[in-house]
Image (cartoon, rainbow, N blue to C red):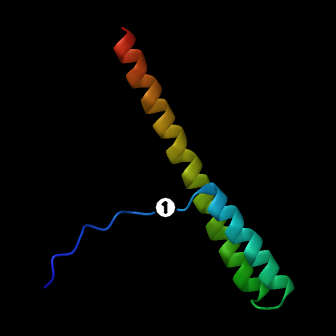
Amino acid sequence: MENQEPKTKKYMSVEETAVLLSETMKDVVERKITLRHALTVSRIAIALAKVIEVVDLNNRVAFIEQTLKKIR
């Protein structure tokens, strides 16, 4: 077995999620995908956007807490 480099986790950004939704809407209009498929993609993208927001908020709170600990 070859020595493989560790895989880095790649998360979608809010911007990438917006692009995904935009492309999905375009695909529906062009009849490349069904509305049912588009709704599924939409639900996943909305859930992902919420997760991204929560992770970002948690990171900001952690940064503020660390900064306050340094000041005290």
The amino acid on which the numbered mark 1 sits, given as a three-letter code, is Tyr
> Circle 1: is it few (<14), some (14-19), or many (20+) Cα within 10 Å?
few
**Residue 47 coordinates in the image, percent (x, y):** 61, 61
From the viewer's perspective, tell me whether residue 29 is left or right of residue 2.
Answer: right
Q: Residue at x 55, y 54 (%)?
A: 51
From the viewer's perspective, tell me whether residue 50 is left or right of residue 6.
Answer: right
From the viewer's perspective, tell me whether residue 52 is left or right of residue 62.
Answer: right
Residue furthest to the left = 1
Q: Where is residue 66, by image quadrant?
A: top left
Q: Residue at x 78, y 83 (%)?
A: 27
Quarter of the picture holding the N terminus:
bottom left
Residue placed most toward the observer, 62 or 18:
18
Q: Judge whether 16 appears above or below 2 on screen.
A: above
Residue placed most toward the observer, 54 or 27:
27
Residue placed most toward the observer, 17 or 45:
17
Q: Could you tell me if residue 46 is visible in this image?
A: no
Q: Where is residue 3, by image quadrant?
A: bottom left
Q: Judge whether 71 appears above or below 4 on screen.
A: above
**Residue 53 coordinates in the image, percent (x, y):** 59, 47
Which residue is tagged 1? 11
